[in-house]
Each structure stands twice: as structure tokens, then as C-alpha cells.
Amino acid sequence: MAGSRSSRLTGTALLAALVVVLDYALKFSGLKIPFPWMPTLKFDFTGIPIALSLLMYGLPSALTTSLVAFVAIVARSGDVVGASMKFAAEFSTVIGLALGLRLMGRFSPRLWKAAGLVFGIVFRVVAMSLANMVVLPAFYGIPVAVAYGMLPLVAAFNVAQGAITILLGVFLDEAVKRRFPTPRA
């Protein structure tokens, strides 16, 4: 999270733009990968720049890139509910990641990465389970009992998507830090 205010702003803007590019490119190319057991859920990579924005610039940057993703999805599709669900999924992931890194970073460098992964996935699964219990019956007319029955599949998808987002985000963050080390004062 080093750097001046202008570098954080520039980095956040670049990562937010990358979120938009990935969202549009994956949507219009048909490269989003359907979750095999529930094809309405699709894997994508738009969460990776959001995770990178957290790791490189902090939680305000992650919030900004998440909001840009929301706006881009609404602009592309007009689907406010779907965009809200994407925002909730990605932002809950980075909140959990941030909390895990903050809590466990004091103990061990190895532990903080594992804690960030676990916290990020758990936050995402809990947030999306709760969101689906509201959204599915209220906006899609799915009976509550059916929505409860769908939760294990929704959770499995969110575990996988959360792991993709966090692991690739951490990998890319470490690659950037190795390539462009922060000068010591």
C-alpha cells in the first residue's frame, strides 16, 4: 500500500478500467465459464483487479473498483439486481481478504496468505448465501424452500470463484512487487 496519493488514484483508475474491459470482453466473447451444476452462475476474472486494488492500494481502492464494476454491469445490461449481486460477491471477498491479512499478518508471513484466502472465501459465501435468500424469492420468484436447496451449489460456486479471485490476485500482486520493488526510505 505504498505510494503517493496520486499513484494510488492512478492505480485505482487503471484497475477499475481493467474491471470494465474484462467484464465487457468476457461477456461479449462468450468466454464466461458456466458452473457445471448451476449454469446460470458463471466464472469470470473481473474480481482479480478488485483484489489487486485491495492488495496494492487498500480497501478504499477495492470499494471504488467494485463500484465501477457495478456501474459497468448496469450500463451493459440494465440488470441492477445482477450488478448488485456481483458487487456484493466481489466486495465481500475483498473485505474478508483484508480482514484476514490484517488479523493474521502480525503472526506469520505464511499464515497471513492462508488467513486472507479463508476469510475472503468465508465472507463471500456467507454474504452471497444471505443475498440469495433475499434476491431469489423477491426478484426471481423462486420459492424459499427451493432457494434453500440451491444454497449448497451457490456456496460451492462462491468457494471456487473466491479462490480464483484471491489466488490470482495475490499471485499477480507478488509478481508486480518482484518486478517493481518499493524503494526503502
Image (cartoon, rainbow, N blue to C red):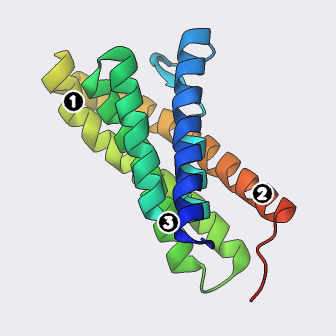
Q: Position of residue 172 (x, y in %)?
A: 74, 51
Q: Which residue is mark 2?
A: 176
Q: Secondary structure at mark 1?
A: helix
Q: Secondary structure at mark 3?
A: helix
Binning the other alpha carbons within 10 Å of mark 2 as few (below 14), some (14 to 19) or many (20 upward) gives: few
Report helix, strand or loop for mark 2.
helix
Residue 185: image quadrant is bottom right
The amino acid on which the numbered mark 2 sits, given as a three-letter code, is Val
- Which label was assigned to residue 98? 3
Q: Amino acid at mark 3?
A: Ala
Foreground pick, 24 / 84 = 24
Q: Position of residue 58 (x, y in %)?
A: 51, 65
Which x, y percent locates residue 42?
51, 22
- Indicate the amino acid at tag 1: Val
Question: Which residue bears the numbered disc 1?
Answer: 135
- Determine if residue 36 is in view: no
